[in-house]
Image (spheres, helix red, strand yellow):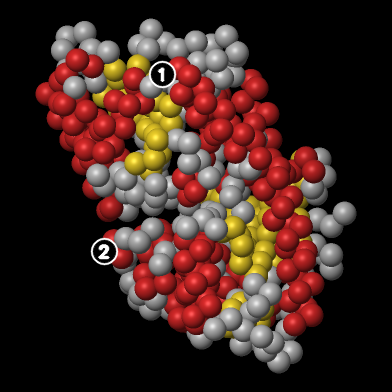
Amino acid sequence: MPRVIVVSNRVTDLSSARQAGGVAVAIADMIPDQQVVWFGWGGAISHTTDTGYGETSCGRSKTVKATLTQEEHDQFYLGYANSVVWPVFHNRLDLAQFEAGYFDTYKRVNRRFAEAIAALLRPDDVIWIHDYHFLTLAKDLRDLGVRNAIGFFLHIPVPPAQAFLAIPEHVELAHALACYDLIGLQTKLDVGNLIDFFLQSVFGHLMRDGSVRVGKQSVRIASFPVGIDLAAFSAVSSDLERSAIETRIVGVDRLDYTKGLPQKFRAYGKFLHDHPEFKGRVVLAQIAPPTRESLEAYCDIRVELENLAGSINGLHSDLSWTPVQYLHRTFDREHLFSIYRGSKVALVTPLRDGMNLVAKEYVASQNSDDPGVLVLSRFAGAAESLSDALIVNPYNIPETADAIKVALEMPLAERKQRHGKLLETITKENSAQWSANFLTHLTAAHRHRLDVNDKPLGQTVTSTDWFKQKSGIEKGA
């Protein structure tokens, strides 16, 4: 069986990856079935120009951790990745910082990582690169002569083409992305947006077989919704009941401007204002772990959220009841699962999100005999398949406030019916199925690429046909 070379921005120890959350959990879930070499930044910053690599083995698999210089951290990670790509891909052009020098450092780090990866490759290795930090990595590997299968999975959303085109380097990024064999995205809408971007940025051709041709390169694009490992939730005690506060509403979101936290707090405040009979009976427990706190936009959202929590508590609390419990810290996953299970409502309201696994984890944690209710933003990727949640527009504060009341008063029969359908969906879209499906399609896409590269264009899809297809994609066809 070939090794899988997994590349992500952050690498953690294989033995503790499941506790890290996010991309790390998805990678950890496939390690038992694959021989994995996990490559990426280990979190260390070198104060010299010596940027070595440390290896740690765990069974058949191992990690290879790189270091970054302070300049690379500031310009590659905080700079281009999180101050340009992240806001643009979340359709926040107003927060993007198109600073000169960021992209050069971004490319330099991608090139350095490519050289290190190429040095450890075997001929049959499969390379699976994750997320927005490495948009140009496949091109660097191809330039170094690597002919292995290279797949890319983007965990964040793809913006509409017009937003993507605002990035000054969008043409270079398009050509770099075309060097992948397969690009995996979270939703069908993301697939439509990326194809649209290729067509508009570099006059790509959408082929009848579903691939996209950019010059002599052929790349396949498809949606692979990230799932969770349901077995992990079997550790949640079946007899763990809800806390004494029966009507706890839970939110678990990184402190990020994409997560809709101010909108969530305002909706909860309006709910209390409109329905004073719930005062003293309901609590919003918002867990907001810190992230990228050195960036100005993240400092601003923290101040805004603290002010909103203080305002709501000041208006509505009494000596025996505080309506908002705002917890700006990290909780381990087992503790989170228990919190999910003990909460009657989960309020998941991102303004834009690639998937949002909190929504799926909440559903998996529930007692099927007395399940809670998921209130979910229509702008989370999870909403594409979790249609039996209460779907809301987080920008519409009254609508979200009304959904909170509906969730709290929902009859048991309806809660069980909705939960059953949601659980069925996340069981089908589990993490093991996700990784296996992606790797299978990557092998096929690599064979296809080798077969068609350097050949004349075959039949393409006309612009009229494409926009008909795109309309179907956006409707979830």
Read off the residue under disc 2. 94
- Please state the horizontal and vertical placement of residue 405, each as a whole percent of the image: 29, 25
Outermost residue on the left side: it is 315
Quadrant position of residue 424: top right
Around disc 1, counting alpha carbons within 10 Å, would you say few (fewer than 14), some (14 to 19), or many (20 or more)? few
Tell whether 32 sits left or right of 475.
Answer: right
Q: Nearer the viewer, mark 2 or mark 1?
A: 1
CA gap, disc 2 and disc 1: 43 Å
Q: Could you tell me which secondary element the residue under label 1 belongs to?
A: loop
In the rendered image, which quarter contains the C terminus?
bottom right
Viewer-proximal residue, 49 or 139? Answer: 139
Residue 208: give its label. none
Residue plotted at (69% across, 87% down)? 458
Q: Secondary structure at mark 2?
A: helix
The residue under label 1 is 411
Height in image: 352 above or below 450? Answer: above
Q: Position of residue 93 (x, y in %)?
A: 31, 65
Q: Position of residue 414 (x, y in %)?
A: 46, 23
Tag 2–tag 1 contact (CB < 8 Å): no
Looking at the image, the residue that sits furthest to the bottom is 456
Q: Is residue 453 visible?
A: yes
Residue 373: image x %, image y %? 43, 27
Above-or-below relation of 113 to 406: below
Q: Earlier in the sequence, mark 2 or mark 1?
A: 2
Residue at 55%, 39% in the rendered image: 21
